[in-house]
Image (tube, helix red, strand yellow):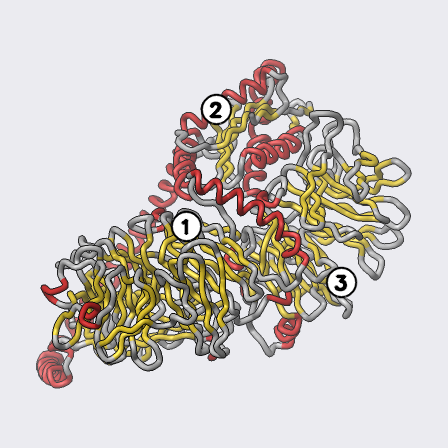
Amino acid sequence: MSIGNAGSSGRNTPRAWMQRLLLALLWLLVLPAAWAAPGTRHYTVSGWTMEDGLPHPLVHVVAQDREGFLWAGTWEGAVRFNGRNFSLFDRQNVRGMELAGVYSILPEADGGVLFGTARNGIVRYYQGAWQRVGGEATRTLAVSVLRRGSDGALWFASGRRLMRLDGLGLHDAGSLAGLPAGEVLALVEDQNGALLVAGEAGLYRIAHGRAQRWGADWVAPGAATALLADGRGGWLAAHDGGVRWRHADGRVERIDVGRRVSAMVLDEQGVLWMNLSDGQLLRRDADGSQWPMGIPGTVNKALLLDREGLVWVGSSDGLYRVADGQASGLTRRDGLGSDYVRTVLQDDAGAYWIGHADGLSRWSQGRMQTIRLGEGAGAHDTSVLSLARHQGLLWVGTYDLGVLQLDLQGRVLQRLRLGSGTQPVVRALLPEPDGSLWIGGNHGLVHWRDGRAHPYLGGAGQPDLVVQALYRDPNGPLWIGTNNGMAMLDAGGRLRRWEPEHDVPAQYFFDFLRDGRGDLWIASDRGLLRMRDGRFTVYDHARGLPRDKLFRIIDDGVGSLWLSSNTGVFRVARRELDEIDAGTRTQLAVHVLDRSDGMPGSQSNGASQPAGWLTREGRLLFPTSAGLAVIEPRAVVTGRVGAPPVAFERIIVDGQAQPLRPLLTLQPRANRLAIGYAGMSFRALDKLRYRYRLHGYDQDWVGATAGDEAVYTRLPPGDYQLEVQAMAMPVDWARSDRIGSAHMRIEVVPALWQRPWVRMLLALGVAVVVALLGWWRTASLRRRQRRLNRIIAERTEELSEKNRQLEVAGYRLQHLATHDGLTGLPNRRAGDAQLVGTVAQARAEARPLSVALIDIDHFKQINDRHGHAAGDAVLQAVGAALAEFVAEWGLFAARFGGEEFLVCMEELPLAEGATRMRELLERIRALPVTTEEGAELHCTFSAGVAELVPGQTPHALLALADDRLLQAKQQGRNRIVAG
């Protein structure tokens, strides 16, 4: 599945390139105006291709059935889509049906679905069963359009004929009614039950067996390519140059697009969507403006407006959904230097300053400007991780260029260097009214004043302390967030620290916010914290937050807090937080915004400041890994998705598929029952949550989160009812108006021995036998029982002891086989296996992967000068530091032999991987190693970093990293080479 903003590109054909050029020119003209209008609607295009389960890239038709499933027709059969996966129906799995070349789909009122094919007539699907429609008379017909009349007759187009199938058989109804010859393109029934026919011959109405020209006073002459009722008593008719719209009051509106309109739908906002003959989807807003949507590939007649107001379109590249999102974004397509955005703020002139992996960009009045930060011609730009504004100027914190001061035109006014060596990573900046500047980052915290840096936290005594948040409390103190606790500097210069887990229930601290009631809100890796009167309250996943790690807190001023995370942006009502504290609520109803709502990416970025901004226009800006997310809080509607319909998709009993029926009967030998279900909300693809309950068996609801199957084993005989409920986030199961449900009766037939009368007979017989034998068996059994108890106890103790010994030995052997005895890290065997698995997973999920080979510099000299014991101590110290570093960042490390180590960095591109290695190098440089003689050693390492590219094997990737390691050594060691 692919998701992007409307206007994404399609195939690399000459016509497609021309379309892209025209689209780019159009966007340059309209984008500033769109951004200037607070109420502008934004659209997101999501796509599904063969990689997602489509059997063929060309989608001929798309429709939605009574239960809410989407159906699409392709050359290789029909597919049913539930929002998560496709179910394919073709000639291979539909026995006796040549289901291929599906040109038309007609959902019916009883839940069945009709399919018209290119060469094999019409087939019908109903409750899991398939049958041919029309018998031999329709078996070889090509069917392109289907329509069921109110009298039950089936109308369809076959070639250049209009056919009718009813209780009397198959008729060439077009010829009988006097319809002029020509291809039939659309069939619609009017309010009187007459059939309206659009085609090459124009627009006709068939009533009482006669065809008459219809709409000649307002329909354009020539072919009528599509016909649509507007739902208000009016009609829209498409033709080769556009659309004519006759309103209910008799007005005729001309909509000229200059191309043939092959299909059209009209949504509730009055937006007209049109598939054009040049392969584009065109959106015409209610104000008359026209917008090409940039659907990849070439669109055809496949166009649908579903029940949630979403537009679905088929093209030569797949199936696409157009949704009006509650968010939008700025990305590289808008001129942004990099999609990996770290920080953002708005200046006094209204411009957005966006720090990202490739530097700094400025967005103003619909134009993006690249700000150059390097010194001299050809100087490199660097990642910008922090921004701050003060008195009309801008402070910029960078990855390796220190701190820069810019004017609002982007000119560098001064450069602050923290020491003479490599500049530290600057993650947070806080200007003071007196002109001084607090600077936080990997170096800790310094206060820049009078041209000098005065350290407060970190430094030589605390080399691993990273300051990533600075907040000046309105009450006066300076709050400091780090990777290992938090601190406060009061007005008198006294510093107080809160140690993680001991003083405060978190370790990483990313943001602070003091509210008007005096509460301090804190974004941490353990959730949202509220500090009141020195005590902390935690709101985490147990209270309804989708994720615990939070990066930014913004108060929108109208009662909600907005929290950024790795899985989207959360809106939490302040009232609900108070209700949690008061004990009147147990769960937060969290509204989640993510990529499906129009954000360029779901992963927000943190550990940089500010990691979000509330603009003076009321917009929210959040940095993400795929661009800058822009949210209009006023457009975000809670409960936008109503009660989602729930449908059962499959019934599997002991591995065998069963028909989908309201009553399921299980025979006595049935062991495992699995019932698949799906919630039908395509607007909330990743936000549906489920629970189910088998009434008569389950004591309470079973929370299924995002599952799709209810499983039971060995159900006892009886009558049950399975109920499945679904709700779109925010989840509040007390809101019955937002819960969709489905029910299924299940009857488990008892076995013969389970029937009451059989059980009574058996019980009576057993009682008689027991009574006869019991008197002489009692004494014997007691003696035997005592003997057996003693033997069992002895044997049990022996077996338990042996099992304990075997378990201990097994654990030791397993650890020795896969870990290095000196450093405790995984060994070469484990490292090779991890590399192969990680490369395979990165390929399958199309995610970045970087690896590094590390070699301790001059290790042989350490052994020669200080002995092998000192060398072992160095290896142990480096191994321990490496283990701590990879655990902190979620990486993998192994000792690869001698003084060489391997690091695998999943989901990190080359630049970020090199960054991680530089951070590790800084730690190793500062790492003291004391020998047995009391000497203190320091060491460095050289490393080569490589990123996996398509088609590359694990061996080739490792070889590339090894080559770069060699380059690092040749360049003087104590460095990272990544390209």
Residue type beneath disc 1:
Gly
Asked which quadrant contains residue 775, the reply is bottom left
Q: In which quarter of the image is the C terminus?
A: top right
Disc 2 versus disc 1: distance between alpha carbons?
A: 44 Å
Within-10-Å neighbours for mark 3: few <14, some 14–19, many 20+:
some
Dot 2 falls on a residue whose secondary structure is: helix
Q: Residue at x 56, y 55 (%)?
A: 599
Q: Residue at x 69, y 41 (%)?
A: 369
Does the CB distance between marks 3 and 2 fall below 8 Å? no
Disc 1 versus disc 3: distance between alpha carbons?
A: 54 Å
Q: Which of 312 and 879 is in front in this view?
A: 312
Q: Mark 1 points at which residue?
A: 279
Counting from the top left corner in percent of width and height, residue 183 is at 27, 59
Residue type beneath disc 3:
Arg
Dot placed on the residue nearer the N-terminal end, 1 or 3: 1
Q: Mark 3 points at which residue?
A: 514
Counting from the top left corner in percent of width and height, residue 416 is at 81, 35
Within-10-Å neighbours for mark 1: few <14, some 14–19, many 20+:
many
Q: Mark 2 points at which residue?
A: 960
Counting from the top left corner in percent of width and height, residue 690 is at 41, 68
Dot placed on the residue nearer the N-terminal end, 3 or 2: 3
